[in-house]
Image (tube, rainbow, N blue to C red):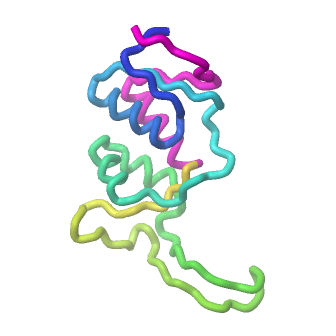
Amino acid sequence: MKTPVLIVGGGPIGLALAGDLGFRGVDCTLIERTDGKVQQPKMDMIGIRTMEYCRRWGIVPWVHEAGYNRAYPQDCAWVTTLSGYEFGREVFPAPQDEKSPPQSPQKRERCPQNFFDPVLRRFAERSAARLVYETELVGFVRA
């Protein structure tokens, strides 16, 4: 297979790069040795800067639709058991009520990797990047 840009790894960074290059009209191919499904997310929150990229790409609504219920408060509680004694609680507003910081019109979003990767995959596919799953890189020749 010949490609001007080869991206190895289909996690959030690889998918975002493939999507951004495709968004800019750069021909690229991403290969990922697995099927791309995330069993155990390695991230839970999308930072402000990443959300600014999502805004540029026009996929913020996809992020909002993919994550948790945006009307549900995100409190963190310390308890003995689910029905036991509550030691303390850190109150966080529902994502829809959280205010953007003064330096950006975007705010962080709760969207774990198992929800975010499919958003980025959809973006990369829409951007005309070639995504090849269940393929492992064992070597390459630069032409």
Q: Which residues are magenta?
A: 114-143
Asked if residue 22 is positioned above or below residue 45 in the image, the reply reads above
Give the residue displayed 30% in from the left and 60% down from the top: 106
Give the residue displayed 64% in from the left and 39% down from the top: 37
Residue 137 colored magenta?
Answer: yes
Asked if residue 1 is positioned above or below residue 49 in the image, the reply reads above
Q: In this rendered view, identify the residue nearer to me: 142 or 106.
A: 142
Give the residue displayed 44% in from the left and 51% down from the top: 63
Asked if residue 54 is positioned above or below residue 142 in the image, the reply reads below
In the image, taking residue 106 as reference, residue 128 lies left or right, namely right
Q: Position of residue 10 (x, y in %)?
A: 53, 34
The single residue placed furthest to the left in the displayed view is 103
**Residue 80 in which image quadrant:** bottom right
Asked if residue 40 is positioned above or below residue 17 in the image, the reply reads below
In the image, taking residue 49 as reference, residue 39 lies left or right, namely right
Q: Position of residue 92 (x, y in %)?
A: 47, 78
